[in-house]
Amino acid sequence: MELIMFVSDCLNVNKLGHLTIGGMDTVALAEQYGTPLYVMDEAQIRSNCRKYKNSIDRFYSGNGIAAYASKALCCKALCKIAMEEGMGLDVVSGGELHTAMSVGFPPEHIFYHGNNKTVEELVTALQYGVGRIVVDNLTELDVLNQLASAQGKNVSIFFRVKPGIDAHTHEFIRTGQIDSKFGLALETGEAMQAVKLASAYKNITLKGLHCHIGSQIFDIEPFELAAQVMLGFIADIKRETGMELQELNLGGGFGIKYVPDHQPVEYDRYMERVSKVVHQTCAQLGLQIPYIIIEPGRSVVGNAGITLYTIGAVKNIPNVRTYVSVDGGMTDNPRYALYHSEYHALVANKANQQRDMTVTVAGKCCESGDLIGEGMLIQKAQAGDILAVLATGAYNYSMSSNYNRLPKPPVVMVKDGESRVVIKRETYDDILKNDLL
C-alpha cells in the first residue's frame, strides 16, 4: 500500500483489498465501464494546476502564467478544467486549438506551438485571435506575416529558441540541443537573424522568446541554465537592436513518478530556484523581470490517471519469462514500444496482497513488440483479474491508435465519489465511419 501511495497521492486500497482512485473502487469502475479503461482523478488534476498557479503568484508576484500543455491529454473536459483553474493553454495543432475554442477558452491565453504549422492552421489561429503564436523558423515567419497582412491584422509572436541545453533525458524527447527539428539556434546566429527580420515586418510584433529543453526531467540545473541562456539572449537583443523583450516562456518538461524509485523535483522547489536565477540574472544584465510562462503537461495529468485492463492468458515459459496478456496494449499505451518507458502495475482486485510475481505485460496486438512492460512485479495474476497500470494520464490516450482496428478506450473522470465519461469508448462503427467503397 505504501508503494501505491508513493506513486500517486490519489491512489489507495479499500477494505475489500481493491485499488481505489479518488476514493472510488477501480474494480467496480472496470465492471461499470468495461476495459480497457482510462480513469482520471479530477481533484488531483486541479491540485496540480493550483500548485503551478500558486508558484507563479508566490515567486513571480503573479507576473506570469502556467499554461497547460494540452498535447499530454487534450479533450473538452481538460481544457475546461484548465480554464477554470486560471491556466493558459499550450496547443500544437489545429485540432487542439479547435478543442480549446469549443469550450470557450480565452484565445488571448493560448500559446500556439509547432515546427511545421500549415497555412490553414495559421489562418485559423489568426481568425481566433490566439494570444501568442510561437514561430519555429524563418519560413513560418514570412508566411505568417503575409497571412496577417491579408487579414489586416498584427500578430504577436514568440520565437522558439534552442538554448543548447542537454537535459540528460531520452534522446527521442530531448528538444533543446542544436540538433533538433524544433526552433532557431543561438550558436549559428539564426535566432538573432530572426529577431532582426521580425522587427522589419509590419504585421508582426515580437513579444518574447520560448524554449523547451526536453521532457521527464528530474534535475533543476538544466532549467536554471536555460533561464540564464535565454535572459542572456534577451540582453544581446537589447544591445544590438535597442528592443527589450518583455515575455519569456521557459517551457515544461517536469518529471513525474512512474515507478516508486523516481524522485521528481517538487514544483515549488523548481519554481523557487529558477525564479532566483531569473531575478539574479536580470539584475546582473540590467533587464526588467519578464512576464514568465511555463508549460506543464505531463506533470498536470500524468499522476492523475491510470489504465485498467482485464487479464486474459497467463503464459509461463520455464526459465524464460511469464507473459500476462491484457485486453489493450500499444494501441492505448505506445510509450513502452516507443521509449521503453517504465511503469508501475498491480492487480487491482488483489491490491492488498504481496507482489511476488515477475511478469511481462503483453498487449493483444499482432505485434511482438506490443508490450506495456517487462520485469514488472505484480500480485499473482490469473485470467479475469483487473490489472492497473499507474501514472498513465499523460501521452497515453493522446498517442493512442486504431492499430489492428481496435477501438480506443473511454476516459472516465472521477470526482467526489462520482464518475462520468469525458471521452466515449469507440465502437467498430466509429472505426468504419470514414471508410468508402
Image: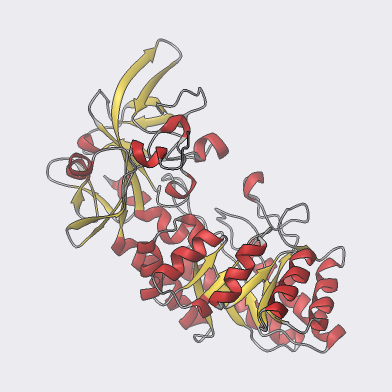
Outermost residue, top direction?
Answer: 318
Residue 431 place in picture, x, y as percent: 40, 39
Q: Nearer the viewer, residue 124 or 12?
A: 124
Which corner quadrant of the image does residue 99 belong to?
A: bottom left
Q: Residue 145: tell me if it is visible.
A: yes
Front-most of residues 181 and 285: 181
Image x and y of residue 1, in percent: 26, 44
Q: Residue at x 80, y 82 (%)?
A: 199
- Using the image, determine if residue 428 lies above or below residue 312: below
**Which one is in front, 411 or 403?**
403
Residue at x 62%, y 56% (from the top left corner): 214
In the picture provided, is 420 more to the left or to the right than 61? left
Q: Residue furthest left?
A: 15
Is 399 located above or below residue 297 in the figure?
Answer: above
**Relative image position of residue 248 (x, y in whole percent):** 64, 77
Q: Is residue 86 left or right of residue 286?
A: left
Does the rendering let one see residue 264?
Answer: no
- From the viewer's perspective, is residue 358 above or below residue 300? above
Task: Name the residue at 19% across, 52% down.
Answer: 24
